[in-house]
Image (tube, rainbow, N blue to C red):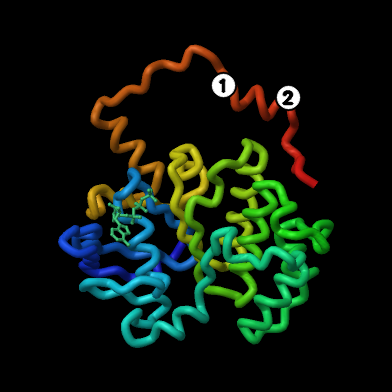
Amino acid sequence: MANKPIITVKNLVKNYGDFEAVKGISFEVYEGEIFGLLGPNGAGKTTTLEIIETLREKTSGEVTVDGFDIETDADSIKKRIGVQLQAAGYYPNLNLSELIDLFSGLYGITKTPAEMLGKVALNDKAKAKFKELSGGQKQRFSIATTLINNPRIIFLDEPTTGLDPQARRNLWDLIREIRDAGTTVVITTHYMDEAEVLCDRVAFVDGGHIIGIDTPDRFIDQLVATGFERAKQTKGANLEDVFINLTGKEWRES
Ligand SMILES: Nc1ncnc2c1ncn2[C@@H]1O[C@H](COP(=O)(O)OP(=O)(O)OP(=O)(O)O)[C@@H](O)[C@H]1O
């Protein structure tokens, strides 16, 4: 992968009153990668993402997204990114088809519901309302809405929280497909197994600082090189393997 930065963050600071939530962080996201922001609750991940998404004011520092400055070109950035909305953002009385039409209209883009729902395997739910969907289907639909404006980058904030093992794996496949089709993906997650298999690179954020940034593989190799050894696994499978083995890998939520 040619490492061409699509997001550049330099010395970003965000204060809420006297409280410094983000304390001068710098990092780059490369074009075409799945980039994970990891860290404990309250580390500053959402604050950082919302500043990059032009939804929140920074205190100081510089951020460019696809060559545009968040300070002077927020509108150009908004046109080039897709941000997952929380469920509350969907009109309750519209079905999925109507919601796609509505969002397309807001973007001034002609996208058919069949095309967008097809991308996330929800064509059979075109007439269903958002609240009637399973957790995995809701996440897939909200990812479809991020893709309507052909974004260069999408931002997913804990997209697999609360999903069952199959639904999580299917969402990983979907996120990889989106990356493979050329869209950069920035994701937050509290599941380290997910970050390990899904993310090309991850940054660890703690207390408003970035404390490490690298590929999952290199992070793990570096830790092992220090002599760290994991408690030996006594069994060749775990309960999640049993779950998947018993209930199958196919999508279960139609
Ligand atoms: N609007 C706000 N006003 C005051 N403090 C805030 C505000 N938003 C966030 N904070 C504080 O800033 C810190 C960073 O919050 P942020 O939501 O960015 O963390 P996070 O890493 O996304 O956490 P989580 O994993 O829980 O989502 C926290 O201490 C939080 O309480």
Image coordinates of residue 133 in percent, x first then y, are 72, 51
Report which residue position mark 2 lands on. Answer: 246
Q: In this view, does 33 lie above or below 170?
A: below
| Tag count | 2
Report which residue position mark 1 lands on. Answer: 238
Residue occupying the point 29% across, 37% down: 222
Residue occupying the point 55% across, 64% down: 85
Image coordinates of residue 7 in percent, x first then y, are 38, 70
Confirm or deny contact between disc 2 and disc 1 (CB under 8 A): no
Residue occupying the point 21% across, 67% down: 11
Q: Is residue 181 above or below residue 79?
A: above
Decide if residue 76 is in sight here. yes
Secondary element type, mark 1:
loop
Under mark 1, the amino acid is Asn
Q: Is residue 145 above or below residue 235?
A: below
Decide if residue 6 is in sight here. no
Q: In which quarter of the image is ligand 1?
A: bottom left
- 192 or 197: nearer the eye? 192
- Ligand 1 near label 2 (Cβ, under 8 Å)? no
Q: How crowded is mark 2: few (under 14 residues within 10 Å), some or many (20 or more)?
A: few
